[in-house]
Amino acid sequence: MLTKKDSYGYTGKILHVDLTTGTLKESSTPLDWARQYIGGAGLAARMLYPLLSKELDPLGPDNPLLLLAGPLTGTRVPLCGRLSICAKSPLTGLWGECNIGGDIGARLRHAGYDGVLIKGRAAQPMLLTIQNGQVTLQEKLRLWTLHVTETITQLHKDYDEKRMATLVIGPAGENLVKFASIMTEGGRTAGRMGLGAVMGSKNLKAIVAIGDTPVPVAKPDELQDLIRTAMKVLMEDFQVSLYKELGTAAFVGHSQEVGSMPNKYWTTSEFPTYDSISGATMAETILVGTSGCYLCPIRCGRVVEIPKGKYKIPRTSGPEYETLGALGSMILCDDLEAVTYAAHLCDELGMDTISCGTAIGFAYYLMDQGKLSTKEVGMDLKWGDPDPQITLIKQIAVREGFGDILAEGVRAIGERYNASDDAVHVKGLEVACWGVRSLFGNAAMYATSPRGGCHLDADIYWVLAGQVIPELGIDADDPQSDEGMGELVARTQNWRMVTNSLNICIFATYTPTEVAQFYSLVTGVSASPQDLLDIGERIITLKRLLNLKLGFIASDDTLPPLLLRPLEGPTRGLVPNLSRQLKDYYRYRNWDQKTGRPSAAALKKVGLDKLDK
């Protein structure tokens, strides 16, 4: 076993919270596993593997909720402050994972812990406070039903600490909406998979982390030298400059030009007035500032304000690309103020904008198709009209009226209205706002993601748009070709398993060599990019084993038929050949073509051949 002197990059402690009994205890961070799975979501998958089962109720007290940082989190390495949050997903029934920015990851580590494992269910709404190694559980009934900003504001008044950060749920989490999110300061969100509902099912309203203890680093002087060099290159990167200037909304224009956004619930490649909801329009109209996460020099977050009118809101976080797609082009809404107001509601009520917008867009589509009546919804849903969407967002959060149906997610809606082929999800998770008709690699990316319709396990859309990684041979000549695309997705996945486990922001354009050097200088463990890639392959394989354990079958690696219907316009009637991509993907991974299960040789290669024994 590794000892404490080998624990550079880790605080060495995991906090265990049993909400049923009120018991608080500590265990040592499993450093042997940390060397094999890095930290963050990778280590979380290993820690949760023996605790998750097909029979486990995701909203029951026995579903463990694990918060876990990576070894770089809370160090001086910029863009590495994120925190992974994992559990069995109530939306998909499979592996549930998301990560969140802001300061919370760093503050948890500065408070003395690498992670927190939460089980049980409290009898009353509770607040968990972690302050420089001191942990308390308090009943906080007065916080229940409060919106997100109200909750965070009250907690900051209660503690009045500069070095603090929070994790909170809103009414959607309290009411077990299947795509409820977990929120932190600055509008940062652990949005996908419904983990806010898991937190709500435990009657845990909020977590506060306060601390100033530094994370132990093996070679601090060399690390600082590398940070200086890497930051100079990063800040000269063109894409980084776009994030600084316009945030992720900068990509609305390009995505519309190639036919990638979810216009009219994914049924048209064209949206002529899209520029009205672009990043440039936001900058010219409602933008009043920018925001960033812990030690972030990019500050991609938009701060907006709408001082008057029907969509009036105070200074708040502005919509990002995914939100502009899910709450804007999804229903053909070109009113930026209306989209921003809808996004603000989702944040305040604690809901994932992608899943929420897709569920509402599906309702608009079903009414347009004659499968849903005005009487059943309680209002008319017309393309381009944002006001019914705003009403439905409010209803979903409290499970009122038709909102109670939408709160179950797109897969359940499709089953209810005999429209499963038109339900845009993968494995139960609503698909992110990057299309497959214009960027063919997105097909295998969504189909094989452990999370389902997720765009963060292999951001192949960036590769296909030109953000290649030459050092790893991650490149593509034609975004609308299936040739070699399955393998390209698999190799990109392997690398993203690494950066996600290190909790590096996806916008950090560090080279693989720089990432390996950061890891080595922080932990004292010498690692090359290839060493890390090998770990990434182990992590993605473990997540496949976890999903198999939770009931996954090979046919779940698929796409909704609606996304594979050809459209005119920028996509020129083209669609990817998913079967060809999957065959290529499984061949590269040495996974069985029929079952999707890793072969014995594949398991042995990554050291998982004895995991089930």
Image (cartoon, rainbow, N blue to C red):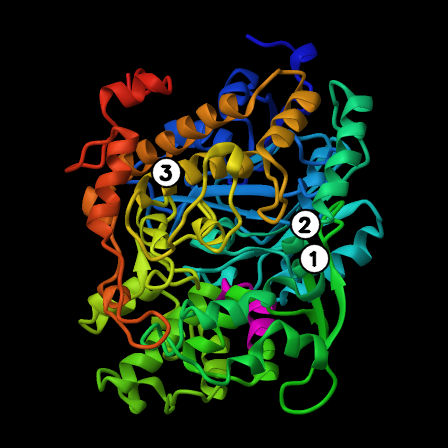
Q: Earlier in the sequence, mark 2 or mark 3?
A: 2
Q: At which x and y percent is residue 320?
A: 58, 65
Give me the residue at 40% from left, 79% from top: 270
Answer left or right for 328 relative to 307: left
| Of residues 604 and 374, the one drawn nearer to the viewer in this rendering | 604
Disc 3 residue crowd, few under 14, some 14–19, many 20+, Cα 10 Å: many
* Pointers 2 and 1 in contact (C-beta within 8 Å): yes
Asked whether 362 or 234 is in front, the reply is: 234
Q: Nearer the viewer, mark 1 or mark 3?
A: 1
**Cα distance in 3D space between marks 2 and 1:** 6 Å
Which of the 4 quarters of the picture holds residue 72?
top right
Instruction: Tell me which amino acid carries mark 1.
Output: Ser
Residue 99 at x, y percent in the picture = 55, 46
The mark found on residue 241 in the picture is 1
Q: Amino acid at mark 3?
A: Ala
Q: Is residue 148 visible?
A: yes
**First reached walking from the N terminus: tag 1 or tag 3:** 1
Q: Secondary structure at mark 1?
A: helix
Q: Are circles 2 and 3 on residues that touch, CB within 8 Å?
A: no
Marks 1/3 in contact by CB < 8 Å: the verdict is: no
Identify the residue under disc 2.
237
Q: Which residue does the numbered mark 3 point to in the structure image?
A: 490
Q: Which segment did they paint magenta?
A: 342-353
Compared to residue 233, the image places residue 411 above or below, namely below
Seen at 38% across and 79% down, the residue is 401
The disc at residue 23 is none
